[in-house]
Image (tube, rainbow, N blue to C red):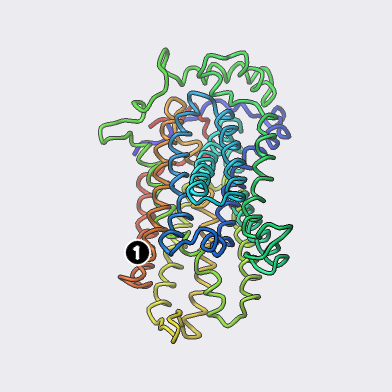
Amino acid sequence: MAGPTGGSGPDIAGDDKVNLGFIIAIVAVATIGGLLFGYDSGAVNGTQAGLQAAFNLDANGLGFTVGSLLIGCAFGAFFAGRLADVMGRRSVMILAAVLFLIGALVQGLTDTHILFVSARFAAGMAVGAASVLSPLYISEVAPAKIRGRMSTVQQVMIISGLTAAFLVNYFLAQKAGSSLGEIGGTTAWRWMYLAQAAPAAIFLVALFLIPESPRYLVMKGKDDAARVVLTKLFGAEAAERKIGEIRASFTAGHRPSFKDITGKFIFRPIVWAGLILATFQQFVGINIIFYYGETLWRLAGVSEEVALERNIISGAVSIAAVLLALAVIDKVGRKPLLIIGSVGMAITLGAMTWAFSGATSDAAGNLALGATAGMTALVAANLYVIFFNFSWGPVMWVMLGEMFPNQMRGSALAICGLAQWGANYVVVQSFPGMAESIGLVGTYALYTAAAVISIFLVQSFIKETKGKELEDMTG
């Protein structure tokens, strides 16, 4: 599959001209969307008992209520990609922040189940939109030399949001006695949703302090506005040159549309490459691994309290892995990190498959592993998370934000965002049935196979984008 062209445009980002402080401020605001993404994913884990009690839900009802976020994410990612070409990158992020703020407040206050699910779906649309627009926006304002590092901040914020949610939930439950206890006349699990309104409000206000993407402005013929932004980013001389390069990357008189991503085999090769990245990031089972974190610690012989503490430590280690990726992604490149991650995940998932092959069940039906197998599963699971967060976790978002030509970036991200969240939903929803029908061994063997297959897919179809200007991307 075709990727970026071999050559790159002139370096508009000499070290003496880049307004690094301005770029960092922009990135800090844009990636709050990633923080919200991670925060909401983590917050729901402490509210399930409250949801069942408040809305009288059975297991299936709870699963749908929790999973409605992922359905919203898929829709949000899809529509945000196209709306970004119509309304602008920043404008759609503002809309997403409003949706998330309203969704958080309604989820925390309503006593009506259908309204709760609707609010959760709306919050999911906001998360899905932010998940694709934050890396897109960052890639369009950051210079090529540091674009990978700046875009990787998105994954740092996702994990930070996840960890923050665990900490907030823990302290709220401690203060109330449990998630069903009350704080100020409101149950703790409701506060867990209401707490999400704070970062959402910050995101909304901060978005008004950053400019629109200069590439979007040129696409809309607003060269003067683009010139102001580019001058502030890179200086007047580079701004004039860059406007010409951006304009040349668009087909004269043609408005971006879904037709731009179509090709001989439904989509253009570069879009298929994006779909590989979007789906296989989920097919390796990353979200399922998180579900067994506490179980694996307890199988290793530690108490529930210590298991929680070690999960928090695991979160910190994950952040460290992403920070390491941030440090090397613009030096080593995207493709080598993906291959390293695929190999590491294949080995660690294989080790987990072996460990589960000797699992038995105790009298209560809980998973039971021998000492060696339990420790193997424990170590392998944590190494797997490290490999993921060093590679596929951040690199997928980086590449989806930068690998597509200007003409099709919004449409391609719409399709890939839909695929990414759709794959997320399929993996999460299929796990219980798979674990029951083919067992944990068969289930983790499939994730292992996906990791192995991803090695060959990356090697064959993914082209390096390190150091290339967005105007040089073809497909």
Q: Is residue 255 above or below residue 185?
A: above
According to the picture, the residue beneath numbered tag 1 turns out to be 446
Horizontal and vertical percent position of residue 445: 35, 68
Q: Residue drawn at (37%, 54%), measured in percent from left and top?
A: 426
Q: Residue drawn at (36%, 69%), measured in percent from left and top?
A: 435
Q: Quadrant of residue 311?
A: bottom right
Horizontal and vertical percent position of residue 203: 66, 39
Q: Is residue 337 visible?
A: no
For the N terminus, give its image quadrant.
top left
For the C terminus, give its image quadrant.
top left
Q: Is residue 63 left or right of residue 382?
A: left
Q: Is residue 437 left or right of residue 412?
A: left
Depth check: 268 or 420 in front?
Answer: 420
Q: Is residue 6 above or below residue 245?
A: below
Q: Is residue 42 left or right of residue 16?
A: left
Depth check: 372 or 143 in front?
Answer: 372
Horizontal and vertical percent position of residue 152: 58, 45
Q: Residue drawn at (35%, 62%), measured in percent from left and top?
A: 449
Indicate the secondary structure of the residue bearing disc 1.
helix
Q: Residue drawn at (48%, 28%), measured in percent from left and top?
A: 83
Q: Is residue 260 visible?
A: yes
Q: Is residue 204 above or below residue 276?
A: above
Horizontal and vertical percent position of residue 18: 69, 30
State how many labels appear. Answer: 1
Q: Amino acid at mark 1?
A: Leu
Circle 1 packing at 10 Å, graded few (<14), some (14-19), many (20+), is some
Q: Is residue 50 above or below residue 90?
A: below
Q: Is residue 134 left or right of residue 234?
A: left
